[in-house]
Image (spheres, rainbow, N blue to C red):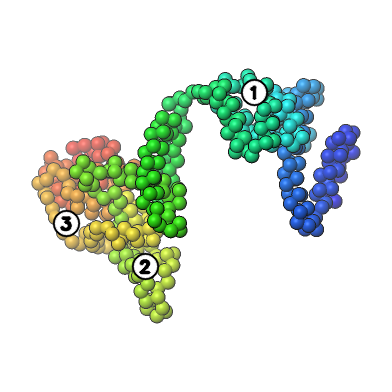
Amino acid sequence: MSIFERPSYSNEAIAGLHDSFDAAVQTPFSVLDLDEQNEFLIESYNAMQRAVGVFALAVHGAMDQQVAKRHGEHSLSTHIAAGVHGSSKRIGAELAVARWLARFSELRTALADGTITVAHVNELRTLERKHPKASASMERAQGFFIDAAQTLQFPQWVDAVGYWFNALDPDGVLHDPTDPKYGAIVTKLPSGDVIVEMRLDPVTGEAWLVATEREEQKIFEAEADLDDADKLSPRQRTMTAIMRLVARGFQQKDGTFPEPMVQLVMSEKVAEDLLARAMGCIDPDTDGPMDFDPFSIPIDYDDLDRRCETLRGTPIHPMHALVPLLIAKMRRLVIDDYNQPTERVEDVPEFRFFTKKQRQVLLALARGKCSIPGCHNPYSWLQMDHVQPHNHHGQTVLHNGQPLCQPHNKAKGDRGVL
Ligand SMILES: [Zn+2]
């Protein structure tokens, strides 16, 4: 029983609709047998779709008869909102389908009698936006859209209807290369994961697809003899392909790399712990094999002995560093409590530029940040700066070096002050 007292409807059709809904609401799902439960599920979905269609019929009628205006409301959405105590903004959005259907009497009826679904309608709305020149012919094609929906599964229906739109308006929406939607957004999460979202124009997109698909195919062929379980998933394959292309771009003409693509800074303690766990060493506490629970490896940004991060200072879970740890080149750097290296790094006092080793040490000490407090410019903008400028007798030694971002370095110039 509903806690709301329903008004007695003057309209028989609507009263019957509500009676049916009330009866459905009061049917306990669990008392139905399996076939009936299935029918309930499928048919309530159908009913939901049809209800949208019935609403579209009502909206069309109300627009035609100027119902809102005759009730002194300036729009249909505010008029409905007043009647149902709802949000006119929400209702305005919900009216979009019904309003769009105002032009299409056959589609409206087909939705109301359950022949097509809201998904069909929304697909047509999208296609119309993409193919504005086809818009004028759509009214005549309603019968085709509806017939096709009765004979084809939804994806095939989308293809069939898509052909129709393409035939009438082959160019579709003209692509504007200055569209701000084109481009890439790269987001680095606190975990170190990086999310890349890209929207490419058709030409750039084609170039991208050709390059990555070719690379994907090579990977796919190389995997031919592997068990299915060992093969990469399609999205892993795409990522691997992209990383290969990136690596190739990073390569110099002679096949070498200017510096490693990834540099990690890991404390000896974390590295040893990680290796011990990976090799199944005995846990001194339990006398059993070390539990390889990655979350038991403590890392701590502020503790020298528990550091595990990229050279730019993003803390990463040691699990992600396991493979690099096994295959990478290592460089030992011992730092004291004052964040100063205790071992001498070879000085080149008269050189104009810092050596690769000096740069790596300075970046590790600065945690990959610009030395100006509060500066968050990207790691790749960093340059190695002589604290006392080189042409003011500043030496190219570790304690006279600091990473500065390019803008701060430029602002400092040779004057040696900011
Ligand atoms: Zn800076």
Residue 386 position within the rendered picture, expressed as x and y whole percent measured from the top left: 19, 45
Query: Amino acid under label 2?
Result: Ala
Q: Residues within 10 Å of mark 3 (few under 14, many from 20)?
A: some
From the viewer's perspective, is 142 left or right of 113? Answer: left
Q: Is residue 279 above or below residue 365?
A: below
Compared across the picture, whether 103 is left or right of 186 comes to right
Q: Nearer the viewer, mark 2 or mark 1?
A: 1
Q: Name, please, the residue furthest toward the front.
A: 225
Residue 414 — which label?
Answer: none
Is residue 126 shown to the viewer in this render?
A: no
Residue in view at x 42 percent, y 64 percent: 294
Identity of the amino acid at label 3? Val
SS assignment at label 3: loop
Q: Position of residue 33 (x, y in %)?
A: 78, 57
The disc placed on residue 138 is: 1
> What is the spatial separation of the Cα atoms under label 2 and label 3, in whole angstroms?
32 Å
Given the current orientation, which residue lies at the most extreme bottom position? 287
Relative to the observer, which residue lies in front, 148 or 401?
148
* CA neighbours of label 2 inside 10 A, class few (<14), some (14 to 19), many (20+): some
Q: Which residue is mark 3?
A: 345
The answer to whether residue 141 is visible is yes
Quarter placement of the C terminus = top left
User: Quick check: is the Cβ at mark 2 less than 8 Å away from ligand 1?
Assistant: no
Q: Residue at x 31, y 58 (%)?
A: 324
Task: Give the residue number, with chain letter if any, for mark 2.
Answer: 278
Distance CA(mark 1)–CA(mark 3): 75 Å
